[in-house]
Amino acid sequence: MEMRIMVDAMGGDNAPGEIVKGCIEALKLKKGFDIELIGIEQEITKYLDKFRYNGNRIIITHAPEVIYNEDKPTEAIRHKRNSSMVTGLKKIREKEGEIFISAGSTGALLAGTLLVAGKIEGVLRPALAPIVPSISGGTMIIDAGMNTQVRPVNYVQFAVMGSVYMEQVFGKDNPRVGLVNVGTEDEKGNSTLREALALLRKCDINFVGNIEGRDIAEGKEDVAVCDGFTGNAMLKMMEGTGKYFFHNMKRIFNSSICSKISALLIKTHLKKLKDSVDPEIAGGTPILGASGLIFKCHGNSGAEAIKNTIIKAHGVSSSGFIEKIKERISDMEVEHG
């Protein structure tokens, strides 16, 4: 039986057209999985009819309701029980599929992960864990928006989950883990961060101590642990800085004939640099600690982002990292009684 990847066809600014297109492109690119499109069947079929595809690898599950960005997240999850998002999260809980992907409301997906899909036993708080570009190749920020207020033990679980993911999925040997703080000295930060620092030093991971925000892009660690407020602010700042950088680079290269010629000479390298920070290329972000594999895509994701998320999620699922997280969290419970 093929792996089942479930996709929220109604989630995001470009749904369902770009979502359907991305799914078709993923199927053409790779074998080993089927796709279940969840949403308003009539709308999905209208776009599917525009493509040639293997009908044996796509099924449609009708879900007549849609959760919108303006909906209050928790209320939407509780009251729109027949929405595409809630239907997919239920299927994760009931093990009807291995993976669920959505570009819909971030708040609703995070609330639904807790209220519907559920957590790995022993995990206190699932966390959003994007990989951002760095000199070392890529650094995980965990948490990046799911938990704005956390306790010291949450930082420890984030660190363990992030370390397992980088090891199992990216093949990082003994990943370096750092705690984001306002300085590298042990006495820096508030009481929660200082207590978290002490706990992390006792944890069975390669903990390098406190780190500062600039260390993330410099690649001095593989996993940057923080609360969701801090992580989300850093992530959005990095996105904005990237746009600023490329905006000004374009302006400079267009300023004269010589600069335009220079741009042509390094065009290939510029494209590689741009692709390294392009959300469409990177695809979605995993929610670590959920009972199944859930990926959150950017709200304005196009077909390219959906395709890349499906391909990435298929590879991640094959790594067995969820079972490894269960094992490590269980060991922590024994250690801490």
Image (tube, helix red, strand yellow):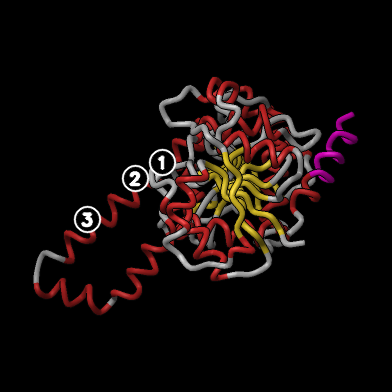
Q: Residue at x 14, y 65 (%)?
A: 254
Q: Which mark is residue 167?
A: none
What separation in Å lies between label 2 and label 1 (alpha carbons)?
6 Å
Q: Which residue is mark 3?
A: 248
| Badge 1: residue crowd in 10 Å (few <14, some 14–19, many ≥20) | few
Contact? badges 2 and 3 (CB < 8 Å): no
The mark found on residue 236 in the picture is: 1
Q: Report how far apart the C-alphas of labels 2 and 3 lie in the structure.
A: 12 Å
Q: Is residue 161 above or below residue 253?
A: above
Query: Badge 2 is on which residue?
Result: 240
The correct choice, above or below, for 153 with respect to 37 in the image is above
Q: Residues within 10 Å of mark 2 (few under 14, many from 20)?
A: few
324 w.r.t. 152: above or below: below
Sequence-first disc among 3 and 1: 1
In x, y percent, where is residue 257? Answer: 9, 74
- Please check the rendered image and state whether residue 331 is part of the magenta-colored stretch, yes or no: yes
Q: Secondary structure at mark 3?
A: helix
Q: Which residues are magenta?
A: 326-337
Q: x, y (%) of residue 253?
A: 18, 66
Q: Secondary structure at mark 2?
A: helix
Q: Specify the amino acid type for callout 1.
A: Lys
Residue type highlighted by circle 3: Asn
Q: Quadrant of the C terminus?
A: top right
* Mark 3–mark 1 distance (CA, rounded to whole Å): 18 Å
Name which quarter of the figure residue 200 lies in.
top right
Label 2 close to label 1 by CB (< 8 Å): yes
Q: Amino acid at mark 2?
A: Gly
